[in-house]
Image (cartoon, rainbow, N blue to C red):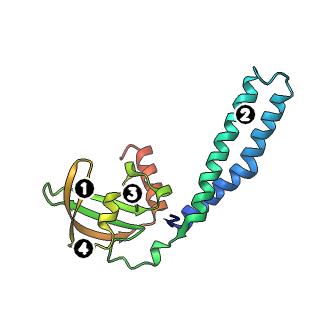
Amino acid sequence: MNHKEPMSTRGYDELLREFKYLKEVEKPRVNQEKQRAAELGDRSENAEYHAAKEKLRHIDKRLFYLNSMIEKAQIIDPSLLEHSRAHFGATVTIMDVNSEEEFVYTICGTLESEPENALISVHSPLARAMLGKEEGDEFSVHLPAGKKSYEVIAVTYIDIYTLKKNIRTEKEFGFH
């Protein structure tokens, strides 16, 4: 089954940038490394040659994966979507109905997700449970810690790249 992979315009651009860099810069550089190592003689005991071959294998695997993601890409500009309901790109504040603890998550694409920074994949169980919900809605979801029930406190839109920048800045200065 060939499903689409939602991602932001910026996420798609980064994907293309990495693909182009690997294909046009990194792979030719490693190919030259391999060629120079091969010229040193006996390949059976040539560590540089085998290391370069292994690097090329990793680059080719990554290129294959990136190409697959590029082909599946469904580019979505969340800023153009209505912000009263949780959707791709939305930042959702939820409250655990039992503990009243609040959490803030941003729903993003697989390649843009950073669960440790509350940027969760649109395919994650929590994100799937939140999709379409609006302020005041309650929902339940099965998580590794068991079934949890939440209430949606707020749905907003914050560009995930602004969020990522702020998270990194906070960590650098010890705020996070």
Q: CA distance from mark 2 to mark 3?
A: 35 Å
Q: Secondary structure at mark 3?
A: strand
Q: Which amino acid does the dot numbered 4 rest on?
A: Glu
Q: Which amino acid does the dot numbered 3 rest on?
A: Ile
Q: Which amino acid does the dot numbered 1 rest on?
A: His
Say left or right for 44 vs 84.
right
Q: Secondary structure at mark 1?
A: strand
Q: Residues within 10 Å of mark 4 (few under 14, many from 20)?
A: some
Q: Is residue 26 visible?
A: yes
Contact, mark 3 vs mark 4 (Cβ under 8 Å): no
Q: Residues within 10 Å of mark 3 (few under 14, many from 20)?
A: many
Q: Which comes before the other along the chain, label 3 or label 4?
A: 3
Q: Which amino acid does the dot numbered 2 rest on?
A: Ala
- At 47% from the left and 57% from the top, the residue drawn is 110
Q: Which comes before the other along the chain, label 2 or label 3?
A: 2
- At 75% from the left and 52% from the top, the residue drawn is 24
Residue with the mark numbered 3? 120
Q: CA distance from mark 2 to mark 4?
A: 54 Å
- At 56% from the left and 65% from the top, the residue drawn is 72
Q: Residues within 10 Å of mark 2 (few under 14, many from 20)?
A: many
Say left or right for 172 vs 30.
left
Q: Which comes before the other along the chain, label 1 or label 3?
A: 3
Expressed as whole percent of the image width and height from the top left, the position of residue 65 reads 59, 52
